[in-house]
Amino acid sequence: MLSKVKSLFIRNKDRNIDKYDIDEKKMDSILSQGAILVDVRSEQEYEEGHMEGAILLPEYDIKKKAGMLLPNKNMNIIVYCSSGTRSKKAQEELEEMGYKKVYNLYNGFQNY
């Protein structure tokens, strides 16, 4: 039973990958072109460790603070969290707000 549930989870996870979900190699390429790296975890998680150069914009504050921290809606933005779940939600929220090029670090910060 557990293996059946696990296989369903893996299939569903793979189905959710879209063209704006990126891996570390693609992230490095986009960052080298001047993208902004955004950590969408909590302030406490950020203080415990974050990627070099990342700004903090917790997922729960996006609607309130994105306009101030990310004024250019046409810039490349990479969002990440611990596992990729909150950052996927943050990516969708930013897109709904009119941001054009928002990338999600698939599987999150846990792998770095």
Image (spheres, rainbow, N blue to C red):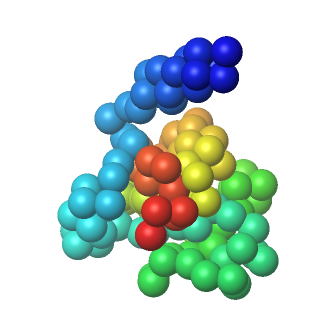
Where does residue 24 sit, x and y in percent of width and height?
32, 60
Callout count: 0
Horizontal side of 27 relative to 69 (left or right) equals left
Horizontal side of 78 relative to 96 (left or right) equals left
Q: Nearer the viewer, residue 9 or 58?
A: 9
Q: Is residue 62 above or below residue 70?
A: above
Residue 73 placement: quadrant? bottom left
Look at the image and tell me whether residue 13 can be seen: yes
Where does residue 26 sit, x and y in percent of width and height?
25, 56
Q: Is residue 55 above or below residue 2?
A: below
Horizontal side of 67 relative to 78 (left or right) equals right
Residue ID at (38%, 31%): 18
Q: Is residue 52 above or below residue 87?
A: below
Give the quarter of the figure containing the N terminus.
top right
Residue ID at (32%, 35%): 19
Horizontal side of 43 relative to 57 (left or right) equals right
Residue ID at (49%, 50%): 107
Residue ID at (62%, 44%): 85
Q: Is residue 15 above or below residue 32?
A: above
Where does residue 69 sit, x and y in percent of width and height?
59, 70
Q: Nearer the viewer, residue 106 or 68?
A: 106
Look at the image and tell me whether residue 93 can be seen: no
Q: Nearer the viewer, residue 102 or 50?
A: 50
Where does residue 54 sit, x and y in percent of width and height?
50, 76
Give the quarter of the figure containing the C terminus.
bottom left
Residue 76 placement: quadrant? bottom left
